[in-house]
Amino acid sequence: MEINLIIFGKLIDITGSAAMTIKNVADTAQLNEQLHSRYPALSSYPYVIAVEQEIVHANTPLKNKDTVALLPPYAGG
Amino acid sequence: MEINLIIFGKLIDITGSAAMTIKNVADTAQLNEQLHSRYPALSSYPYVIAVEQEIVHANTPLKNKDTVALLPPYAGG
Amino acid sequence: MQEKKPKNIFVQGAIAASFIADSIQKHKSQTGIGGHSIFLGQVRADIMGEKKVASIEYTAYEEMALEIMHIIREAIFAKYPLTCLHVHHSLGNIAAGEICLFVFASSAHRKAAMDACGETVERLKAELPIWGKELFEDETYKWKENI
Amino acid sequence: MQEKKPKNIFVQGAIAASFIADSIQKHKSQTGIGGHSIFLGQVRADIMGEKKVASIEYTAYEEMALEIMHIIREAIFAKYPLTCLHVHHSLGNIAAGEICLFVFASSAHRKAAMDACGETVERLKAELPIWGKELFEDETYKWKENI
């Protein structure tokens, strides 16, 4: 199983990429764990996770091919 | 002594004129008295008096050549 | 931004959309501005009984209105950190659907611009000696009353 | 005024004053409107230390932003008696002094238009996934933070 991760704003400076495929993550807690081990700097930046465009705060199961987004604080307008 | 009276809005419908000269009025109370006897309908309309562009509520003495305005409720915008 | 002589706020006839665009465009060089708040009054084709408003004919005690607007401007500038504040009000016959009032407040931040714009609109409606005659399609009329 | 499909609010590049004028002009035929409230966001040439912002580069999670904007629109229409509500937000590089946000609320009466415009601005700033990269004149940058 794999998910499509999309990354926005300042977080792209950390991951170096705006989109990537992540394998073997059953839920958002595992996703965060994998991301923080690959990009230690990520853990010191505030962001929320959206699964299929819905913001999730609690740990949330992920399905194959889900689109998951990392959203740093908004700055529109 | 005489004053220049200017009239606005709905009040012109009563006086039939937007400007007139009024003689022998020493203060705004006398002016109101004279106007109400000439135009009885005026007494049933709300208006304020401005003497030289300053709104006056209490009885106010008038000087020769003063410009006095009758101002019905405003409706700008 | 204090001025000695009151600015003229009155324009003959309706306020054109192109005039509003020019006014916005002129603020491009003021790069300290972060937000503009604009209010536009548009003449409504109100229906009263069986009659419909075709236009409003605006008149004002102009000199007095300009003096009072000057006082309002100074109070608004004293209260809010504004970059600029522009007010334009129509005189004469304005057809339904046309713009008769244009208030334009600009500031570094949105809240000051919005609050200043709103307060200016409220104050000018309450304090400026301006009157409107609502002309119906059958050529009768009724004097407008602000609620 | 309910819509099935979210409207696109995003425009590439700055919002031109002529676009705003056209938008105002189009409301002339809606003679039930008495007041328009407009908010314009303008890119500020903020100074940070010795650097000056030359432009902001806006990006968004577009599909998600449009869904959320649709929800905000429906909530605003449910709360205020509006005739219409238009929102336009820039994407891409917007130079200091240019307009990047245009919110336009119209109603029979001013209060609804003003309150709806203000609330829409607050909500979209807080809820839409949009980001801005402040580009300095020396080509370094800083990610914009809404306060």
Image (cartoon, coloured by chain):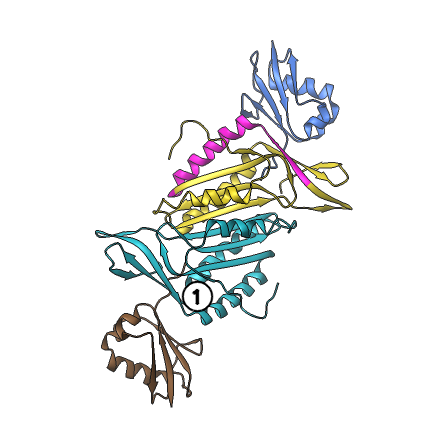
Chain colours: A brown, B blue, C yellow, D cyan
Indicate the position of residue B69 as horizontal and vertical percent values: 60, 23
Asked if residue A63 lies in the magenta stretch, the reply is no
Asked if residue C56 lies in the magenta stretch, the reply is yes
Residue sitting farthest toward the top: B1
Residue sitting farthest toward the left: D50
* Location of the N terminus of chain D (image quadrant): bottom right
Which residue is more in the foreground, C29 or A59?
A: C29
Q: Residue at x 48, y 59 (%)?
A: D88
Q: Quadrant of residue C48?
A: top right
Which residue is more in the foreground, D82 or D62?
A: D62
Above or below for B38 versus C71: above
Residue where numbered disc 1 is placed: D127
Above or below for D32 versus B37: below
Indicate the position of residue B40 as horizontal and vertical percent values: 74, 23
Q: Quadrant of residue A27?
A: bottom left
Three-letter amino acid code at disc 1?
Answer: Glu
Magenta segment, principal secondary structure? helix
The range drawn in magenta is C55-82
* Location of the C terminus of chain D (image quadrant): bottom left
Left/right placement of residue D106 relative to residue A47 reads right
Left/right placement of residue B73 relative to residue C5 reads right
Q: Residue at x 40, y 44 (%)?
A: C27
Q: How many marks?
A: 1
Q: What chain is tagged by disc 1?
A: D
Q: Secondary structure at mark 1?
A: helix
Indicate the position of residue C22 as horizontal and vertical percent values: 47, 43
Q: Quadrant of residue D78?
A: bottom right
Left/right placement of residue C10 relative to residue A28 reads right
* Mark 1 residue crowding within 10 angstroms, few (<14) / some (14–19) / many (20+): some
Indicate the position of residue C38 as horizontal and vertical percent values: 49, 47
Which residue is more in the foreground, C128 or C98?
A: C98
